[in-house]
Amino acid sequence: DSAAMVELGFDTTQPMTLEQMIHHCQAVHRGVIASINATKSKMEKPKVPLLVGDMPFGTYEYKDLDIALKNAYKMVKEGG
């Protein structure tokens, strides 16, 4: 994910952890909520964006599907 390189200063995207990605998704989610709340006072209906987060390298490449699904559920549940 580009957050690893652009925001965290890693040389590649591979060191990004699931917890770091969830942290970034939560920050974006807070911004989305604030934006929606700011437009509520206007007459127009607020547009609700779709928040998309990447599963970091190594969080889904498992022979055990349960681990991959657990990580995906965690990302959806905690990411916002």
Image: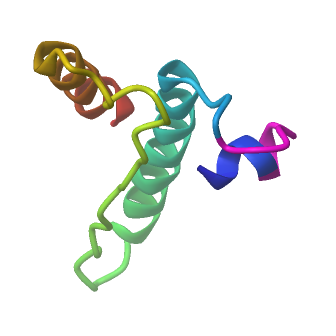
Part of the protein shown in magenta: 6-13
Verify whether residue 7 appears in magenta: yes
Indicate left or right for 5 with 22 as reference: right
Point 32% across, 67% down: residue: 49
Q: Is residue 41 above or below residue 14?
A: below
Of residues 29 and 11, the one drawn nearer to the viewer in this rendering: 11
Image side of residue 8 versus residue 57, left or right: right
The front one of 75 and 62 is: 62
- In percent of width and height, residue 20 lies at 58, 26
Question: Residue at 25% of width from left, 34% of height from top?
Answer: 76
Which quarter of the picture shows residue 59? top left
Q: Is residue 10 magenta?
A: yes
Q: Position of residue 14 (x, y in %)?
A: 64, 36
Name the dominant secondary structure of the magenta segment.
loop
- Percent from the top left, x then y, of residue 67? 22, 14
Viewer-side residue, 50 vs 12: 12
Q: Is residue 72 above or below residue 47?
A: above
Q: Position of residue 9 (x, y in %)?
A: 87, 40
Which residue is drawn at the image coordinates 82% and 38% (left, top)?
A: 10
Q: In this rendering, would 1 be left or right of 7?
A: left
Q: Residue at x 44, y 55 (%)?
A: 32
Q: Is residue 21 above or below residue 48?
A: above
